[in-house]
Amino acid sequence: MRNRVIVLFILIHLISVFAFSLSQRNVTIKIAVDEETRKSRSKWREAVGRIVNDATRNWQEMFGIRFEIKKWAMWKSENTKNSMYLLLNDLKKKVSKNGCDIVIGFTSQRTMEKEILGIAYYSTPYILIRRPRTGSIAYALLRNFVSHELCHVFGGIDIQEAGSIMDKKSWRGRFDEFTTKIILLNKERSFDPYLFPLPRTKIEQAISLYEERRALGQQELGLNIILGELYIENGNYETAIEVLIEALNKDLYSHEILNLIGIAYRKSGKVDKAIEMYREALRFNPDYAETYNNLGVVYLEEGMIDKAIEMYKTSIALYPANARAHSNLGLAYLKKDLVDDAIRECLQALKIYPLLAEAYSILGVAHIIKADFSQAERFTRKALDINPDLSSAHNNMGSIYFNKGSFDLAEQEYLKALQLDFSYYEAWYNLGRIYLSKGEHERAIEKFGKAIGLKPDFYQAYCNLASALLEKGLTEEAIKNCIKALELNSEYGLAYVNLANAYYKKGLSDKAIKASEKATSLDPELAEAHNILGILRGKEGKRKEAIKEFSVAITLRPDFSEAYFNLANAYYREEDLDKALFYYKKTLEINPEWVQVYNNMAVVYYYKKDYPSAWKYLIQAEELGVAVNDDFKKILREKMKK
């Protein structure tokens, strides 16, 4: 007997030492109690608090996890819900975490009497417990169920192992070896609803543990579900689909499994199958807000913007606290040029979750569209402070640098975006714009081609590809790409502008005029359309009309150096030398490297008989590489001697 006491003492001592050596983690709980539970007991707070405290007491000893009830909420549960799954959605919708890590809801609804006693998801730190009939057996069962559901939050799954806390047939309180390993691995898991629970550094280790368990062939459904989540997060979509379909064959009606398969299909580019899975998930759980959000993502990627907006709005109606749905709705509004609506939704997203980098990035895009580049940079840098690997934010920074004329910095940002997401077609497109602006037309053509390969209906890319081809003198190819752009979007004014330029270069003036007039009718505020129309009017000898069109162009776009140059040329032909000089100078203010302007100014000063100024600009033109007229230079030298 004495030996047994000594052995017991040693075991207790070892357990105490082990617990003491574990690092400690504090986890805060918010308890939400519905009206039925509150009515069933006068001292409901004490009763529920005791259940939770008793259920979590040995967690600190076993895992170094200390739970603290930090807040309470009175939850008005929806009486029309007929399943624990639907009621869990109601809990998430109505009870926010308010700075706590986990929410545990308690319900005593009569409609749930034949339902499971508890439900929780790994990725969502919400637990719902159904309180059964009172009594000592019921109390022990409820205590174990709370601990059981907490295990799910820390990565545990339902297993077939007699005596384990995770074996539904026994409901005992013992932590089996597998569950213990999983909880310890997930001990420092994130409770941030917008981050995956495990850091990337632990995902492979988790997969290994779950796959070892799966190899036992126990047909444990939860293994497949959590493995599916892990494989999706790890980018192994085909394996995720494989294990999730295996799970679906065991439970054909699981909206959770169907939703995950939809995610894996979308991320692997199988859009039609993704939509099919999402719709099937909603058939079994029409209140599943996350699936509506996921459907919105697919529709937006496929260019079905109105459908995407509808899905995001439904998701928000079901779960107003979903910051990501608000942010996604903002992005959809941007695609429809509803910039103020986009800003409103993103600000709402940030009100819910101030660390949502995507919302800051979308705000950056919105302010780029509004030409408020200072605000755009502020929001974009905030996005990158939160998530330095956010490809859309690097794309934004590229566009901000592009606007500043810092092409090399812009190029670096676009390349960084592509390093993070090689399939980011907008970054390929923007990289093409950089090379087009730098006069590197071959590289521009290549990048626009990459963008089109990734998104075959990218009409803007076809249009800019036409611009690069025009610069290379490939007029016929440019025309084909303009026509393709217009097939995709018949109201895209810039495509008509490029088409007009192409026809003009081919000497097809009538077609060029028709295309430029179409551009101005579609978009009267398109400066490029007025510029090409001005060129064409000048060729017709209609100089007054040409001047009018160039003037409209610079009013619409005050930094449009080409329009200033054309306007200066038009005034020169009208022999209004002062205005010609004025607009040549404006051209140089915007683009001091436009060498032809120096030569033209020399000519204007010559006719104004300001020979020193004429000589100054002629020499500048020559130094910059212009092949100046030798006869003109000789005459001007003679004038200088006099």
Image: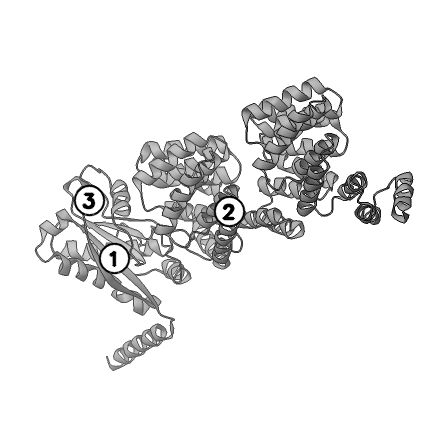
Q: Disc 3 versus disc 1: distance between alpha carbons?
A: 16 Å
- Residue 554 in picture, x, y percent from top left: 61, 37
Task: Quote the CA–CA distance across marks 1 and 2.
Answer: 42 Å
Mark 2 vs 3, N-terminal side: 3
Q: Which residue: 17% across, 57% down? A: 48
Tag count:
3
Disc ID at residue 101: none
Name the residue nearer the viewer: 157 or 123.
Answer: 123
Identity of the residue furthest to the top in this view: 510
Residue that label 3 marks: 77
Q: Residue beneath label 1, please? A: 30
Rendering coords of residue 454 (x, y %)? 60, 36
Q: Is residue 267 left or right of residue 87?
A: right
Q: Is residue 206 left or right of residue 33?
A: right
Given residues 28 and 558, the one toward you in this image is: 558
Give the CA distance from mark 2 to mark 3. 46 Å
Query: Among all residues in the image, which is located at the extreme front?
Result: 642
Which badge, 1 or 2, comes first in the chain's sequence?
A: 1
Residue type, label 1: Lys
- The answer to the question of whether label 1 and label 2 lie on touching residues, with beta carbons closer than 8 A, is no
* Label 2 vs label 3, nearer the camera: 2
Give the amino acid type for the residue marked by disc 2 in the picture. Asp
Q: Is residue 186 left or right of residue 113?
A: right
What's the mark number on residue 372? 2
**Labels 3 and 1: the sequence-earlier one:** 1
Can you tell which quarter of the image residue 103 is in?
A: bottom left
Of 131 and 96, the residue lying toward us: 96
Three-letter amino acid code at the position of disc 3: Ser
Judging from the image, what secondary structure is the residue with disc 1 in? strand
